[in-house]
Image (cartoon, grey):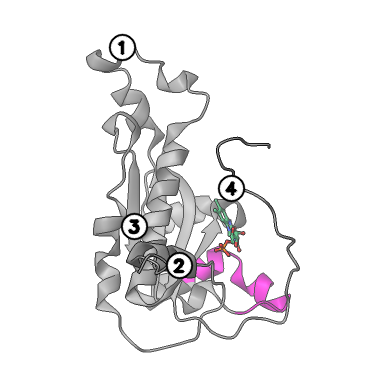
Amino acid sequence: MANEETYLQNLLANRKIVRNYIETTKEFPELKKVIDYAIKIPTAGFSRGIEFVHVSKKENINKLAYLANEESYVEKGFNKWISNSLSIYLILINEKAYHDRYSEKDKKNSTQSSDWIVPYWYVDAGAAMMNCMLLIEEIGLKSGFLGSHNMKSAEIKSLIKIPESYQLLGFVTAGIEGKASSIKKNVPKKKITHYEYFNK
Ligand SMILES: Cc1cc2nc3c(=O)[nH]c(=O)nc-3n(C[C@H](O)[C@H](O)[C@H](O)COP(=O)(O)O)c2cc1C
């Protein structure tokens, strides 16, 4: 039927950032495969400068929660989030891969990566983030995203043994949604899709 949502439309319509997961001992082996598909992104010049680390051991998840200052959020009345994740996917940006690629022979006539108006490594990282979230949604879990501005990046990189030159974009989290905290924001609607012309 014309009005029915497609599978992808339905996944997109249901995805939302969830920051409250319940504790569970349930296992979701599908979580292991997420990064094999999440990484299937186009990258500028096929630089392949985006990488993932899948963290699933409880011990490491707890360490990441600590380094993401979870305690201070819980003290403010927010739900436990990071430490109750079943998996955490770290999105990494290897900017050097882009500069190396764009200094190759066939890219000599292109605008050099250091002069890009929009740094494409962030574009590619965003695509990886979205793939990851949709794959989590497909498993029947809910995804969240915590940006690296809210965590101790250097300590996380050292814990996970990530090369110093890589940037950490943040964590995509996966878990089972719990009850929302009582802190609710009233966000007004905003027109962000336009047809044919931006303004009438
Ligand atoms: C790049 C980026 C960074 C974000 N950083 C954070 C963050 O650090 N902490 C957080 O709670 N949410 C973060 N979010 C989530 C957004 O604040 C917000 O929840 C999201 O836009 C709501 O979308 P949704 O309800 O459609 O999922 C981030 C989202 C994006 C795309």
Residue furthest toward the bottom? 25
In terms of sequence position, does the residue under pointer 4 or pointer 1 come before the other?
A: 1
Residue 4 locus on image (x, y percent): 39, 69
In terms of sequence position, does the residue under pointer 2 or pointer 4 come before the other?
A: 2
Which residue position holds label 4?
193
Local SS, label 3: strand
Ligand 1 shown in quarter: bottom right
Q: CA distance from mark 2 to mark 4?
A: 28 Å
Q: CA distance from mark 4 to mark 1?
A: 37 Å
Q: CA distance from mark 3 to mark 1?
A: 32 Å
Which residue position holds label 2?
173
Q: Along the line of sight, which residue is nearer the eye, 60 or 47?
A: 47
Q: Is 35 displayed left or right of 75 in the figure? A: left
Q: Amino acid at mark 3?
A: Val
- Residue in the image at 29% along x and 25% along y: 101
Say if mark 2 contacts mark 1, CB within 8 Å.
no
- Residue in the image at 73% along x and 76% along y: 183
Crowding at dot 4, Cα within 10 Å, few <14 / some 14-19 / many 20+, comes out as few
Q: CA distance from mark 3 to mark 4?
A: 34 Å
User: Residues in magenta?
Assistant: 63-79
Q: CA distance from mark 3 to mark 2?
A: 12 Å
- Name the quarter where the C terminus is drawn: top right
Residue 102 locus on image (x, y percent): 33, 21
Q: Amino acid at mark 1?
A: Lys
Q: Amino acid at mark 2?
A: Thr
Q: Amino acid at mark 4?
A: Thr
